[in-house]
Amino acid sequence: MKLTLLCWQLLLLSSLVYCSLGQGGDISLPAYLSVSPDRSQFFKYESFSLSCEDQGNSAGWRVMRNAERGNVSECNIDWGKQQGSSCIVLLIPSDSGVYWCESGSGEHSNAVNITVHDGAVILESPALPVTERDSVTLSCRYQGTLSNLTADFYKNGSLIRTETTGEMTIPAVSESDEGLYKCNNSEGESPESWMTVTVPTPIPSPAVPVLSMSLPRLLCSLLVGSPYLLVTIILMVKGCRSRTPGETRIPRNTHQDQLGDCVEEKRG
């Protein structure tokens, strides 16, 4: 019986280890590509840096690029310079393309679209998604001067605003602000860039408990709970069968029996 109990304990332990370590998505989360400065358009010969962040550790991830010519390559091989966990790029027009992080096992991070413009005007807009209700400023930047120029801002091809400062601020962005933006001023027109707006996940109210469990976790819960329930039933059955055939239980006196004894004593 002790050996059987030990076996079930070992099975239970192995189940717990499987549930803690055996679910691939819980250990190796995808990396996140960060861009500094956070904008999607640059003039040629400007520089920017890209970093792969994986729970504070960038080891095992590399920055990749799919250039407009369709060539997929890695930082520090055909372009860019690796400095610690960051890839530093001195930009030329052929560096326009999609950038992302990739692991040795083929996992991918988010991707950003970078445009390197050979003209006089660019739109400074976020390369990374912005969160709903955040304040966002779009700037129509002219390369040849630091003075502010009146600029027209367009979304999805339609004029939405004219600003004398060359900047347009959206105090609290919403999903409806997501789209393709560009600007122009007296010096020229910028390329178009897509601005993505994400909606934060609502926090459930403490008064209303929310049960959310993935299929792997549900299977693990059943796997862990089943041996415990089964071993309890087995121990109860073995305990009942361990009684000898000749063993007799002496029943306890009922309340009526105790009352009868008291009456007999009084009569005696």
Image (tube, rainbow, N blue to C red):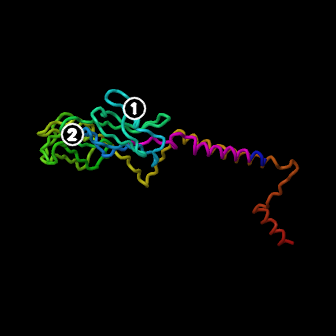
Question: Is residue 15 inside the magenta stretch?
Answer: yes
In this rendering, the answer to whether 175 lies above or below 205 is: above
Q: Residues within 10 Å of mark 2 (few under 14, many from 20)?
A: many
Task: Give SS at disc 1.
Answer: strand
In this rendering, the answer to whether 171 lies above or below 194 is: below
In this rendering, the answer to whether 6 lies above or below 64 is: below
Residue at 84% across, 68% down: 264
Dominant SS type (magenta): helix
- What span is colored magenta in the figure? 6-33
Q: Residue furthest top?
A: 70
Q: Nearer the viewer, mark 2 or mark 1?
A: 1
Indicate the position of residue 256 as horizontal and vertical percent values. 76, 62
According to the picture, the residue beneath numbered tag 2 turns out to be: 122
Say whether disc 2 or disc 1 marks the residue closer to the N-terminus: 1
Indicate the position of residue 103 as horizontal and vertical percent values. 47, 37
Residue 101: quadrant of the picture: top left
In this rendering, the answer to whether 143 lies above or below 71 is: below
Quadrant holding the C terminus: bottom right
Question: Is residue 185 inside the magenta stretch?
Answer: no
Residue toward you, 268 or 71: 71
Task: Give SS at disc 2.
Answer: strand
Distance in Å between CA atoms under marks 2 and 1 = 26 Å
Residue toward you, 130 or 188: 188
Indicate the position of residue 45 as horizontal and vertical percent values. 26, 39
According to the picture, the residue beneath numbered tag 1 turns out to be: 73
Residue 206: quadrant of the picture: bottom left
Q: Residues within 10 Å of mark 1 (few under 14, many from 20)?
A: some
The amino acid at mark 1 is Ser
Relative to 204, is 228 on the left or the right? right
The amino acid at mark 2 is Ile
Relative to 117, is 25 on the left or the right? right
Residue toward you, 142 or 15: 142
